[in-house]
Image (cartoon, grey):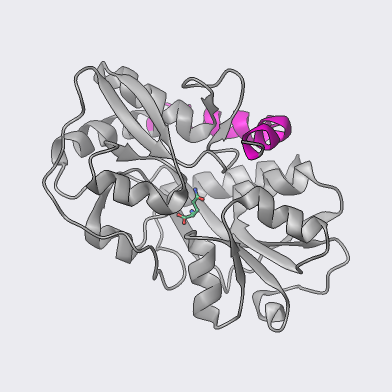
Amino acid sequence: MKKMKKLLALALAGVMMLSAVACGSKEDGASGDGAANGTANGTITFGTNAEFPPFEFVTSQGAIGEFDGIDMAIAKQIGDDMGKEAKINNMEFDSLLLALDNGQVDAVIAGMTVTDERKEAYDFSTPYYTATQVMIVKEDSDIKAAADMKDKKIVVIQGYTGETCVKDMGYDYEAFKKGTEAVLELVNGKCDVVVIDSATAEKFVGDNEGLKIVEDPSAFEAEEYAIAVKKGNTELLNQINASIQKMLDNGTVSELSAKYLDMDTDEDASSSDAE
Ligand code: GLN
């Protein structure tokens, strides 16, 4: 619990500070420009990857259908503010930005870090959350800093900024499609460390015995989560920004963060994993 409070404080302080981006920020094969695509009549479709508690996960009754989490509640509120029904298109993280290009989704909300490379091809909203990459290790691990990962078996999640960080450090790694799979690999002793976003790491460590988080702020910079839209879709971006600003100002984002960080999402996470 104490850790979660600390994390929440960090996240909120970060949002206020609006600090820099990830570590290096080379990432994601998605490209494309294209004209803005409006939201379909009466609905706004968000793309996400519901494998990322506490931001998005599958549950029986979520904020939007079976999808729940901080991002899902934010998406629902954006829809409400626009007078539209928010819908979710759940897909692999790697496909999300391409889905914007194809017009499959109007916006992407997925704990997505704003990076220089992503910003070149997509427009991002006002950031709503600050995180950082951390290392999940076994409780008895001798990894105390990022440099200690040298010669260790490292696992990352494909397409996440954590992959970029480890790549930029020059270390070999294996990439998994889901955070839950990566953590299972660690639990089973098949790897030494998983590099992943802080709040999600807290969730996974809380859900599994014998794991701990190692932070290294000198190696992993602050990352800001924001919503992506197609480049030039200013009308939608302005609406999203108005909604996010309101939720930041009136405390909704802090309330949602506290609620979902404290919530037991374990069963939800594993049920989504089983699909
Ligand atoms: N923040 C990380 C990124 O943008 C991971 C996001 C996610 O898995 N949903 O790459």
Residue 105 place in picture, x, y as percent: 29, 37
Residue at the image position 42 percent from the left and 54 percent from the top:
94
Which residue is more in the foreground, 4 or 271? 271
When the figure is inspected, residue 123 is found, relative to residue 74, above or below; the finding is below
Residue 257 place in picture, x, y as percent: 56, 35
Residue at the image position 67 percent from the left and 41 percent from the top:
5
Q: Is residue 195 magenta?
A: no
Residue at the image position 71 percent from the left and 47 percent from the top:
204
Q: Is residue 23 left or right of residue 86?
A: right
Q: Disc count in the image?
A: 0
When the figure is inspected, residue 46 is found, relative to residue 154, above or below; the finding is above
Residue 253 place in picture, x, y as percent: 47, 32
Q: Quadrant of residue 149?
A: bottom right
Which residue is more in the foreground, 210 or 255? 210
Which residue is more in the foreground, 199 or 181? 181
Q: Residue furthest front?
A: 275
Residue range corresponding to the magenta coloring: 249-273
Residue 241 place in picture, x, y as percent: 27, 36
Viewer can see residue 17: no
Q: Is residue 237 left or right of residue 210?
A: left
Residue at the image position 57 percent from the left and 50 percent from the top:
10
Q: Main secondary structure of the magenta part?
A: helix
Image quarter (top left, top right, bottom left or bottom right) of the C terminus = top right
When the figure is inspected, residue 191 is found, relative to residue 229, above or below; the finding is below
Q: Is residue 108 left or right of residue 236?
A: right
Viewer can see residue 146: yes
Image quarter (top left, top right, bottom left or bottom right) of the N terminus = top right
Q: Is residue 268 magenta?
A: yes
